[in-house]
Image: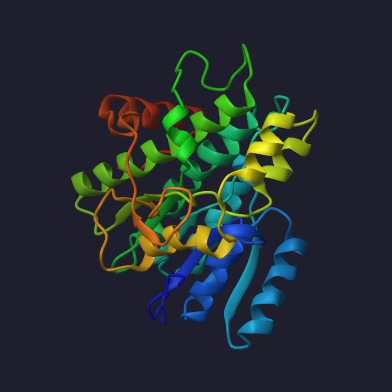
């Protein structure tokens, strides 16, 4: 039984990476529940194809495709500015898009290592830039997708972007730990500022999506061990992988700074997830936030 999203009529949701996988499933279920959904995608043609799939199932769905490339801070700014100019409150932001395990090091348009830039620094900048629209909503929520790999991550402030010795899995784990730290620090900022905004983390377990195939195709070859391990590990559907994120975004039974994933870690219905102790290090979270502001040039308005 997958998670049933409660009624979302009158709400506006933004889902990054909505053209496939967990993002497309989240957009579909939010639209089916009555939300207006902005499908924020890097490739508009793929986004439009996903939109047509959603409309084929739900002809009355209110879904729109807009381009945003999280690996390009100028594009993030343009997207966020367009949303803020619309003047409509944003009720839900799902930071879902990501890239996983490129075998060789790539850089974003701004010179960041690709996984750190796309999975964390881009979403950080997007979230902060969208705060004016989020804070117009009655009870906004920001859900940032992490991963069980966060437990294997480390935040090395001396080489945050892997310029010295690149590791595909290490870079992914770092970006996902950073995402979890972002969810925690944004929760603290919201509380300190008196905002009625919930910041939450989620992870999809081992969802059957294309992310494990797309990243390794970015130059080089994935190891045989990786290919075999990914296939033999218990998996559930992309829809089931989206459910913890949707639960965090729409359930009444969540708490500020909560973290949600499959009940059995890799698979299962949404439930509270276990934090790696690294994600609860407040000093690291505060320092990472400050460093992210410096790197992206994006700050919370005073």
Q: Residue at the location (69% across, 69% down)?
A: 50
- Compared with 109, 50 (above or below) is below
Q: Mark yes or no: residue 301 visible.
A: no
Camera-nearest residue between 78 and 127: 127
Is 148 above or below relative to 261? above
Corner quadrant of residue 4: bottom left
* Quadrant occupied by the N terminus: bottom left
Image coords of residue 276 (percent x, y): 34, 34
State the image coordinates of residue 187 (x, y, percent, origin top left): 28, 46
> Where's residue 178, x and y in %?
44, 34
Between 154 and 123, the one nearer to me in the picture: 154
Q: Quadrant of residue 188?
A: top left
Quadrant the C terminus occupies = top left
Which one is in front, 20 or 83? 20
Classify residue 51 as left or right of residue 200: right
The residue located at (57%, 59%) in the rendering is: 22
Q: Look at the picture and state if 70 lies above or below 239.
A: above
**Residue at image coords 29%, 66%:** 139
* Residue 257 in view of the camera: yes
Question: Outermost residue, front direction?
Answer: 232
What residue is shown at x 45% (from left), y 54% (from top)?
130
For residue 199, side relative to residue 208 (left or right) = left
């Amino acid at each position: 039984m997958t998670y049933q999203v409660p009624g979302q009529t009158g709400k506006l949701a933004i889902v990054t990476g909505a053209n496939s996988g967990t993002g497309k499933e989240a957009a579909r279920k939010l639209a089916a529940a009555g939300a207006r959904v902005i499908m924020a995608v890097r490739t508009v043609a793929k986004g439009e194809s996903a939109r047509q799939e959603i409309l084929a199932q739900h002809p009355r769905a209110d879904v729109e495709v807009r381009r945003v490339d999280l690996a390009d801070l100028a594009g993030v700014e343009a997207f966020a500015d367009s949303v803020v100019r619309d003047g409509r409150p944003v009720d839900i932001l799902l930071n879902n898009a990501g890239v996983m395990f490129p075998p060789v090091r790539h850089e974003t348009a701004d010179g960041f290592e690709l996984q750190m830039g796309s999975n964390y620094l881009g979403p950080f900048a997007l979230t902060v830039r969208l705060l004016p629209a989020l804070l117009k909503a009655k009870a906004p929520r920001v859900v940032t997708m992490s991963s069980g790999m966060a437990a294997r991550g480390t935040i090395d402030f001396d080489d945050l972007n892997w310029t010295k010795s690149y590791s595909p899995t290490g870079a992914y784990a770092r970006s996902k730990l950073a995402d979890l730290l972002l969810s925690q620090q944004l929760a603290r900022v919201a509380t300190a500022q008196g905002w009625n905004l919930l910041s939450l983390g989620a992870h999809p377990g081992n969802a059957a999506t294309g992310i494990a195939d797309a990243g390794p195709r970015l130059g080089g070859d994935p190891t045989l061990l990786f290919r075999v391990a990914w296939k033999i590990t218990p998996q559930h559907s992309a829809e089931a992988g989206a459910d913890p994120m949707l639960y965090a975004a729409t359930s009444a039974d969540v708490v500020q700074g909560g973290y949600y994933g499959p009940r059995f870690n890799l698979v299962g219905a949404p439930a509270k997830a276990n934090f790696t102790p690294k994600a609860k290090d407040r000093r690291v979270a505060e320092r990472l936030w400050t460093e992210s502001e410096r790197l992206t040039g994006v700050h919370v308005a005073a």
